Amino acid sequence: MRAAYGLEVVACDSAEGACRAADILVTATPSHEPMVRADWMKPGLHVTAVGSDTPGKQELDAACLARADIVVVDRLSQCARFGELSHALAAGLMREEDVRGQLGEVVAGRKPGRTRDDGSRSAI
């Protein structure tokens, strides 16, 4: 990675270690149990959870979304029924109104995404 892209890559021996060290965290697993805990999220961390795309899947502890300063979803109607947002809603940690917007709205500039780099946490 350093030779190809100029990036330093460090191997971690645990999910916790990887989360605590990361600036950007992308999960892409078929997990049905949370693999990332909210207390592992440092200020400034961006999380994209890709794997929880069908009912029953969950990669993030529901508190991760509640702890995030910004939550953006693919499609609100879908994500409220299954995936990471559904778990946060079911736990009473978030309301649909707490979601900043849908990814297409942010990409199109109709809703703001991250507006500062000084420690806000974001989850998509």
Image (cartoon, rainbow, N blue to C red):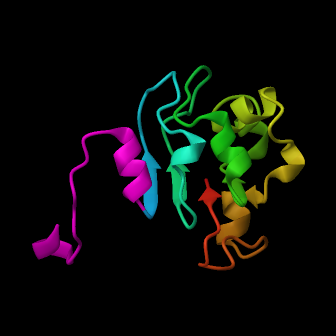
Whole-percent x and y of residue 13?
A: 24, 41
Q: Is residue 10 above or below residue 53?
A: below
Q: Is residue 12 magenta?
A: yes
**Stretch of the chain drawn in magenta:** 1-22
Q: Is residue 84 above or below residue 30?
A: below
Whole-percent x and y of residue 98?
A: 84, 51
How many marks can you see? 0
Whole-percent x and y of residue 78?
A: 72, 36
Which residue corresponds to the image point at 22% horizontal and 62% vertical from the top-left? 9
Q: Is residue 73 magenta?
A: no
Which residue corresponds to the image point at 54% horizontal and 39% vertical from the top-left? 37
Left or right of 110: which side holds 49? left
Q: Is residue 70 above or below residue 117?
A: above
Q: Quadrant of residue 84?
A: top right
Left or right of 114: which side holds 12? left
Which residue corresponds to the image point at 63% horizontal and 44% vertical from the top-left? 64
Q: Quick one: 40 or 55, which is closer to the camera? A: 40
Whole-percent x and y of residue 60?
A: 56, 37
Which residue corresponds to the image point at 73% horizontal and 65% vertical from the top-left? 105
Instruction: Name the residue at the left extreme.
Output: 3
Instruction: Name the residue at the front extreme.
Output: 39
Q: Quadrant of the N terminus?
A: bottom left
Q: Quick one: 92 or 26, which is closer to the camera? A: 92
